[in-house]
Image (cartoon, rainbow, N blue to C red):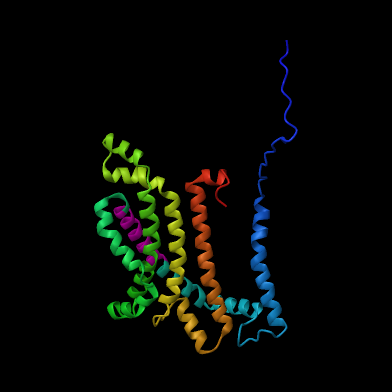
Amino acid sequence: MALATAAAPPELVTPQVRIPRPRSRGRAIALRALGPLAILAAWWIACATGVLTSDLLASPPAVFSAALDLWRSGQLSQALGVSLLRAGTGLAIGVLAGLVLGVVAGFSRAGDDLVDSAMQTLRALPFLSLVPLFMVWFGIGEAARIILIAVATTFPMYVSTSGAVRNADRKLVEAARTFGLGRFATVRQIVLPGALPALLSGLRLSTTLSVIALIAAEEINSTSGLGYLMSEAQDFSRTDILTVCILIYGLIGLTADILIRGLERLLMPWRTAGGGAR
Protein backbone atom coordinates (compact mmCIF):
# COMPACT_ATOMS: atom_id res chain seq x y z
CA MET A 1 0.00 0.00 0.00
CA ALA A 2 1.42 3.35 -0.97
CA LEU A 3 2.27 5.62 1.90
CA ALA A 4 0.29 8.87 2.02
CA THR A 5 2.51 11.97 1.94
CA ALA A 6 1.68 14.77 4.36
CA ALA A 7 0.68 18.00 2.65
CA ALA A 8 3.00 20.96 3.25
CA PRO A 9 1.55 23.81 5.36
CA PRO A 10 0.26 26.58 3.07
CA GLU A 11 2.41 29.27 4.79
CA LEU A 12 5.65 27.57 3.74
CA VAL A 13 7.21 28.21 0.36
CA THR A 14 9.45 25.99 -1.64
CA PRO A 15 13.08 27.06 -1.06
CA GLN A 16 14.87 28.37 -4.12
CA VAL A 17 18.60 28.01 -4.26
CA ARG A 18 20.33 30.83 -6.09
CA ILE A 19 23.44 29.72 -7.88
CA PRO A 20 25.63 32.65 -8.95
CA ARG A 21 26.28 32.68 -12.65
CA PRO A 22 29.96 32.70 -13.64
CA ARG A 23 31.01 36.11 -14.96
CA SER A 24 32.89 36.12 -18.22
CA ARG A 25 36.48 37.30 -18.16
CA GLY A 26 35.92 39.75 -21.01
CA ARG A 27 33.00 41.41 -19.23
CA ALA A 28 35.00 41.72 -16.01
CA ILE A 29 37.88 43.39 -17.87
CA ALA A 30 35.47 45.74 -19.65
CA LEU A 31 33.84 46.77 -16.37
CA ARG A 32 37.23 47.38 -14.76
CA ALA A 33 38.29 49.54 -17.71
CA LEU A 34 35.27 51.84 -17.39
CA GLY A 35 36.62 53.77 -14.39
CA PRO A 36 40.03 54.67 -15.90
CA LEU A 37 38.40 55.52 -19.25
CA ALA A 38 35.97 57.87 -17.51
CA ILE A 39 38.85 59.65 -15.77
CA LEU A 40 40.75 59.93 -19.07
CA ALA A 41 37.68 61.35 -20.83
CA ALA A 42 37.07 63.92 -18.07
CA TRP A 43 40.73 64.96 -18.19
CA TRP A 44 40.66 65.31 -21.99
CA ILE A 45 37.44 67.35 -21.96
CA ALA A 46 38.73 69.64 -19.20
CA CYS A 47 41.89 70.38 -21.21
CA ALA A 48 40.01 70.84 -24.49
CA THR A 49 37.51 73.30 -22.97
CA GLY A 50 40.19 75.34 -21.20
CA VAL A 51 39.20 74.37 -17.68
CA LEU A 52 42.71 72.94 -17.29
CA THR A 53 45.49 74.97 -18.89
CA SER A 54 48.85 73.48 -19.90
CA ASP A 55 50.68 75.21 -17.03
CA LEU A 56 48.39 73.40 -14.58
CA LEU A 57 48.12 70.01 -16.29
CA ALA A 58 49.12 69.00 -19.80
CA SER A 59 46.51 67.38 -22.04
CA PRO A 60 46.55 63.62 -22.76
CA PRO A 61 47.95 64.12 -26.33
CA ALA A 62 50.74 66.34 -24.95
CA VAL A 63 51.56 63.76 -22.29
CA PHE A 64 51.61 60.98 -24.88
CA SER A 65 53.89 63.06 -27.12
CA ALA A 66 56.25 63.78 -24.22
CA ALA A 67 56.39 60.08 -23.31
CA LEU A 68 57.19 59.22 -26.93
CA ASP A 69 59.98 61.81 -27.09
CA LEU A 70 61.48 60.63 -23.80
CA TRP A 71 61.37 57.01 -24.96
CA ARG A 72 62.97 57.77 -28.33
CA SER A 73 65.77 59.72 -26.68
CA GLY A 74 66.45 56.82 -24.31
CA GLN A 75 65.89 58.94 -21.18
CA LEU A 76 62.71 57.16 -20.17
CA SER A 77 63.99 53.60 -20.57
CA GLN A 78 67.17 54.45 -18.66
CA ALA A 79 65.29 56.17 -15.82
CA LEU A 80 62.75 53.34 -15.64
CA GLY A 81 65.49 50.72 -15.41
CA VAL A 82 67.22 52.56 -12.55
CA SER A 83 63.96 53.06 -10.62
CA LEU A 84 62.87 49.44 -11.06
CA LEU A 85 66.26 48.20 -9.84
CA ARG A 86 66.01 50.41 -6.75
CA ALA A 87 62.46 49.38 -5.94
CA GLY A 88 63.11 45.68 -6.63
CA THR A 89 66.27 45.55 -4.52
CA GLY A 90 64.68 47.35 -1.58
CA LEU A 91 61.52 45.25 -1.83
CA ALA A 92 63.48 41.98 -1.90
CA ILE A 93 65.47 42.97 1.20
CA GLY A 94 62.39 44.20 3.06
CA VAL A 95 60.22 41.18 2.23
CA LEU A 96 62.96 38.74 3.21
CA ALA A 97 63.60 40.58 6.50
CA GLY A 98 59.88 40.77 7.30
CA LEU A 99 59.40 37.09 6.48
CA VAL A 100 62.27 35.88 8.66
CA LEU A 101 61.41 38.15 11.60
CA GLY A 102 57.72 37.25 11.31
CA VAL A 103 58.47 33.52 11.44
CA VAL A 104 60.80 34.00 14.42
CA ALA A 105 58.23 36.07 16.33
CA GLY A 106 55.26 33.91 15.39
CA PHE A 107 56.74 30.45 15.84
CA SER A 108 58.42 30.69 19.24
CA ARG A 109 57.53 32.43 22.48
CA ALA A 110 61.13 33.54 23.03
CA GLY A 111 61.22 35.00 19.53
CA ASP A 112 57.96 36.82 20.17
CA ASP A 113 59.35 38.32 23.38
CA LEU A 114 62.59 39.38 21.72
CA VAL A 115 61.39 40.60 18.34
CA ASP A 116 57.76 41.68 18.48
CA SER A 117 58.02 44.57 20.94
CA ALA A 118 60.92 46.10 19.01
CA MET A 119 59.17 45.68 15.66
CA GLN A 120 55.89 47.14 16.93
CA THR A 121 57.80 50.15 18.31
CA LEU A 122 59.65 50.74 15.05
CA ARG A 123 56.48 50.17 13.01
CA ALA A 124 54.88 53.16 14.70
CA LEU A 125 57.52 55.46 13.19
CA PRO A 126 56.50 56.94 9.80
CA PHE A 127 59.18 55.81 7.39
CA LEU A 128 59.20 59.19 5.63
CA SER A 129 60.42 60.79 8.87
CA LEU A 130 63.55 58.64 8.61
CA VAL A 131 64.73 60.28 5.37
CA PRO A 132 66.87 63.02 7.04
CA LEU A 133 68.40 60.49 9.43
CA PHE A 134 69.27 58.10 6.61
CA MET A 135 70.91 60.96 4.72
CA VAL A 136 73.11 61.60 7.77
CA TRP A 137 73.94 57.92 8.21
CA PHE A 138 74.33 56.76 4.61
CA GLY A 139 74.84 60.00 2.69
CA ILE A 140 72.90 60.86 -0.45
CA GLY A 141 74.00 57.78 -2.38
CA GLU A 142 72.15 54.74 -3.55
CA ALA A 143 72.37 52.93 -0.19
CA ALA A 144 70.09 55.43 1.57
CA ARG A 145 67.40 55.03 -1.12
CA ILE A 146 67.44 51.24 -1.09
CA ILE A 147 67.46 51.04 2.71
CA LEU A 148 64.50 53.43 2.91
CA ILE A 149 62.49 51.19 0.54
CA ALA A 150 63.57 48.10 2.50
CA VAL A 151 62.47 49.62 5.81
CA ALA A 152 59.10 50.67 4.38
CA THR A 153 58.38 47.17 3.05
CA THR A 154 59.59 45.17 6.04
CA PHE A 155 56.74 45.97 8.44
CA PRO A 156 53.69 44.92 6.35
CA MET A 157 55.41 41.63 5.60
CA TYR A 158 56.34 41.17 9.26
CA VAL A 159 52.81 41.83 10.54
CA SER A 160 51.20 39.47 8.01
CA THR A 161 53.75 36.71 8.56
CA SER A 162 53.83 36.80 12.36
CA GLY A 163 50.02 36.81 12.59
CA ALA A 164 49.64 33.93 10.14
CA VAL A 165 52.32 31.83 11.80
CA ARG A 166 50.74 32.34 15.24
CA ASN A 167 47.44 31.09 13.85
CA ALA A 168 48.98 27.99 12.31
CA ASP A 169 47.17 24.75 13.13
CA ARG A 170 48.80 23.64 16.42
CA LYS A 171 47.58 20.08 16.00
CA LEU A 172 49.46 19.77 12.73
CA VAL A 173 52.56 21.32 14.28
CA GLU A 174 52.43 18.96 17.26
CA ALA A 175 51.87 16.00 14.95
CA ALA A 176 54.90 17.02 12.89
CA ARG A 177 57.04 17.23 16.01
CA THR A 178 55.72 13.88 17.26
CA PHE A 179 56.84 12.26 14.04
CA GLY A 180 60.30 13.76 14.45
CA LEU A 181 60.14 16.66 11.99
CA GLY A 182 62.69 19.35 12.90
CA ARG A 183 61.78 22.98 13.55
CA PHE A 184 63.06 24.24 10.21
CA ALA A 185 61.28 21.47 8.31
CA THR A 186 58.09 22.10 10.29
CA VAL A 187 58.15 25.77 9.34
CA ARG A 188 58.90 24.98 5.70
CA GLN A 189 56.45 22.12 5.22
CA ILE A 190 53.61 22.88 7.66
CA VAL A 191 53.57 26.48 8.83
CA LEU A 192 54.46 28.48 5.71
CA PRO A 193 52.09 26.63 3.31
CA GLY A 194 49.24 27.23 5.76
CA ALA A 195 50.18 30.90 6.05
CA LEU A 196 50.36 31.42 2.28
CA PRO A 197 47.20 33.60 1.89
CA ALA A 198 48.43 36.02 4.57
CA LEU A 199 51.94 36.02 3.13
CA LEU A 200 50.64 37.03 -0.29
CA SER A 201 48.51 39.77 1.28
CA GLY A 202 51.60 41.06 3.06
CA LEU A 203 53.53 40.95 -0.21
CA ARG A 204 50.85 43.05 -1.92
CA LEU A 205 50.97 45.66 0.83
CA SER A 206 54.77 45.70 0.75
CA THR A 207 54.79 46.14 -3.01
CA THR A 208 52.44 49.12 -2.78
CA LEU A 209 54.61 50.71 -0.11
CA SER A 210 57.75 50.07 -2.18
CA VAL A 211 56.40 52.38 -4.89
CA ILE A 212 55.54 55.08 -2.33
CA ALA A 213 58.98 54.73 -0.76
CA LEU A 214 60.59 54.83 -4.21
CA ILE A 215 59.03 58.23 -4.88
CA ALA A 216 60.29 59.53 -1.54
CA ALA A 217 63.73 57.95 -2.00
CA GLU A 218 64.22 59.49 -5.43
CA GLU A 219 63.66 62.92 -3.95
CA ILE A 220 66.98 62.52 -2.09
CA ASN A 221 69.18 64.52 -4.47
CA SER A 222 68.78 61.88 -7.15
CA THR A 223 70.87 62.07 -10.33
CA SER A 224 69.12 59.23 -12.15
CA GLY A 225 65.77 57.49 -12.27
CA LEU A 226 62.23 58.76 -12.59
CA GLY A 227 62.70 61.08 -9.62
CA TYR A 228 65.53 62.85 -11.43
CA LEU A 229 63.35 63.29 -14.51
CA MET A 230 60.64 64.80 -12.30
CA SER A 231 63.09 67.20 -10.65
CA GLU A 232 64.30 68.45 -14.05
CA ALA A 233 60.72 68.78 -15.31
CA GLN A 234 59.76 70.73 -12.20
CA ASP A 235 62.57 73.24 -12.79
CA PHE A 236 61.23 73.97 -16.29
CA SER A 237 57.51 73.69 -15.36
CA ARG A 238 57.04 70.78 -17.80
CA THR A 239 53.73 69.41 -16.59
CA ASP A 240 53.68 66.93 -19.49
CA ILE A 241 56.87 65.19 -18.29
CA LEU A 242 55.73 65.39 -14.66
CA THR A 243 52.50 63.64 -15.65
CA VAL A 244 54.41 60.98 -17.60
CA CYS A 245 56.50 60.16 -14.52
CA ILE A 246 53.46 60.10 -12.20
CA LEU A 247 51.61 57.77 -14.57
CA ILE A 248 54.63 55.47 -14.78
CA TYR A 249 54.81 55.28 -10.98
CA GLY A 250 51.16 54.25 -11.02
CA LEU A 251 51.76 51.68 -13.76
CA ILE A 252 54.62 50.16 -11.78
CA GLY A 253 52.32 49.66 -8.78
CA LEU A 254 49.50 48.32 -10.95
CA THR A 255 51.78 45.88 -12.78
CA ALA A 256 53.22 44.60 -9.51
CA ASP A 257 49.72 44.03 -8.15
CA ILE A 258 48.68 42.12 -11.28
CA LEU A 259 51.78 39.93 -11.03
CA ILE A 260 51.02 39.09 -7.39
CA ARG A 261 47.40 38.25 -8.29
CA GLY A 262 48.77 35.89 -10.93
CA LEU A 263 51.09 34.36 -8.36
CA GLU A 264 48.13 33.94 -6.03
CA ARG A 265 46.15 32.08 -8.70
CA LEU A 266 49.16 29.88 -9.42
CA LEU A 267 49.90 28.99 -5.78
CA MET A 268 46.29 28.81 -4.56
CA PRO A 269 44.16 27.63 -7.49
CA TRP A 270 41.39 26.41 -5.15
CA ARG A 271 40.52 30.00 -4.21
CA THR A 272 39.89 30.93 -7.83
CA ALA A 273 38.02 27.71 -8.50
CA GLY A 274 35.76 28.31 -5.52
CA GLY A 275 35.07 31.88 -6.47
CA GLY A 276 36.76 33.24 -3.36
CA ALA A 277 39.35 35.23 -5.20
CA ARG A 278 38.67 37.79 -7.86
The answer to whether residue 14 is above or below residue 98 is above
Q: Which residues are magenta?
A: 88-105
Is 226 left or right of 7, judged from the image as shown?
left
Membership of 95 in magenta stretch: yes
| Residue furthest bottom in the image | 236
Name the residue nearer the viewer: 158 or 181.
Answer: 158
Q: Report if residue 100 lies within the magenta region.
A: yes
Q: Name the dominant secondary structure of the magenta segment.
A: helix
| Residue for point 65% across, 77% down | 60
In the rendered view, would you say 260 is above or below 64?
A: above
| Residue farthest toward the right in the current orientation of the protein | 10
> Quadrant of the image for the N terminus?
top right
Where's residue 80, x and y in %? 48, 72
Q: Residue 155: x, y in percent? A: 37, 63
Query: Residue sitting at 51 percent across and 86 percent down?
Result: 234
x and y percent of residue 201 in the render?
A: 46, 56
Whether residue 142 is situated above or below residue 31 in the rendered picture: below
Q: Residue at x 65, y 66 (%)?
A: 35
Q: Is residue 18 left or right of 227 when viewed as pictured?
A: right
Lateral position of residue 196 relative to residue 56, left or right:
left
Measured as percent of width and height from the top left, residue 236 is found at 53, 89
Question: In the picture shown, does residue 100 fall above or below 48?
Answer: above
Q: Quadrant of residue 88?
A: bottom left
Residue at the image position 59 percent from the left and 80 percent from the top:
66
How many numbered discs, if any? 0
In the image, 77 versus 31, the foreground residue is 31
